Image (tube, rainbow, N blue to C red):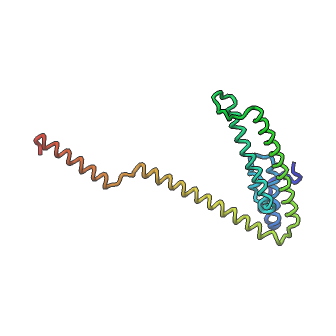
Amino acid sequence: TPSHQPTTRPNPRQTLSRGWKAVIEAWLTTAEASQGNKGLPDLADQIAIKLLAGSQLDSRTDIAAKLADLDAEITAAEASEGDHEADADALSPGDIRKLKTARTKLKKALKEIDGSLLATARRTLEAMLADDAPSPAIGALHNRFDRLTTDHFAAIERDAVIRYDDLVDKYGTTLRSFEAARDEATARIDAHLEQLGYG
């Protein structure tokens, strides 16, 4: 259990009134509380970790990627275990056990890195002067808002394209096409009526 885990959620207005360093500390407190909580963003996505321990994130990213690959490989191998028509290259139960052992080691390594990230972030914050906090904090917020705005407008653009495609599928036939089809049908009817002696 993190030593700085909060018992209540920080109040943003009260936090900001104590200065930008308190804002960053609130972010870090949230990051510390997110450990083990699958409903919260991954530690690497926490704004405080990016701000205070970003230089260590590359190694974590590599381990997290390897762990995801192992998870996928194990899931696929277990799914094909009972399949008698499985590929000849299918993994044996022994191979699967080895993969699970490797996964356990990676999970342990990831947990250790997360602990190191939090410790580094806490040390960096404690060494930070109050006057040094506004620039990185505001910069982090700017980047976050910029990303959210970009994602929002990208979603609007995707929705507009989908709606346009739907309209084209539904109403794609132009007025000129309708008029040409009408004229062709009228000509056929006139010709037919002439044959019947009504011309």
**Extreme-bottom residue of the structure:** 131
Residue 122, percent from left and from top: 86, 60
Residue 187, percent from left and from top: 20, 48
Q: Residue at x 81, y 60 (%)?
A: 53
Above or below, 66 relative to 96:
below
Residue 64, percent from left and from top: 75, 49
**Extreme-front residue of the structure:** 88
Above or below, 168 relative to 18:
above
Above or below, 177 relative to 145:
above
Q: Residue at x 70, y 41 (%)?
A: 72
Q: Is residue 10 visible?
A: yes
Taking the image as shown, residue 143 lies to the left or right of residue 48, namely: left
Q: Is residue 11 visible?
A: no
Q: Residue at x 58, y 56 (%)?
A: 155
Query: Total number of numbered labels?
Result: 0
Give the quarter of the image for residue 135: bottom right
Most foreground residue, 35 or 113 = 113
Q: Residue at x 49, y 52 (%)?
A: 163
Above or below, 129 relative to 187:
below
Most foreground residue, 22 or 147 = 147
